[in-house]
Image (cartoon, helix red, strand yellow):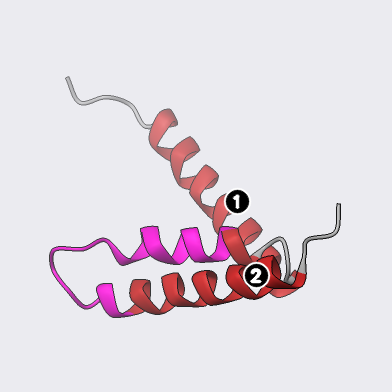
């Protein structure tokens, strides 16, 4: 299914806005900026190869961290 031009423009505007909010929020102590960056990349990944590549790399890194934490012996 090919998205309409309005949908593509809306996705770009929303995706880039979320990434910008995430970068700014990275400097604020209350808001988790990485959540906004991941959401923006997820939206843009359907339209941009670069965004898809970055999102896939971040997913692999996240899975690696999850696996290392799961394999860590508990200190109980």
Element at badge 1? helix
**Residue at 45% across, 39% down:** 66
Q: Which residue was labeled with disc 2?
A: 51
Quarter of the figure with residue 49: bottom right
SS majority, magenta: helix
Quarter of the figure with residue 27: bottom left
Q: Nearer the viewer, residue 76 or 8?
A: 8
**Residue at 65% across, 75% down:** 9
Residue 26 seen in the current view: no
Q: Nearer the viewer, residue 12 or 74?
A: 12
Is-magenta flag for residue 40? yes
Magenta stretch in the rendered image = 24-42
Element at badge 2? helix
**Residue at 37% across, 32% down:** 72
Q: CA distance from mark 1 to mark 2?
A: 14 Å
**Residue at 48% across, 60% down:** 38
Q: Which residue was labeled with disc 1?
A: 60
């Amino acid at each position: 299914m090919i998205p309409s031009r309005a949908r593509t423009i809306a996705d770009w505007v929303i995706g880039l806005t979320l990434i910008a909010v995430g970068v700014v929020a990275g400097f604020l102590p209350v808001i988790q900026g990485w959540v906004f960056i991941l959401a923006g990349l997820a939206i843009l990944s359907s339209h941009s190869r670069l965004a898809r590549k970055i999102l896939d790399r971040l997913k692999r890194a996240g899975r690696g961290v999850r696996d290392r934490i799961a394999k860590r012996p508990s200190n109980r």
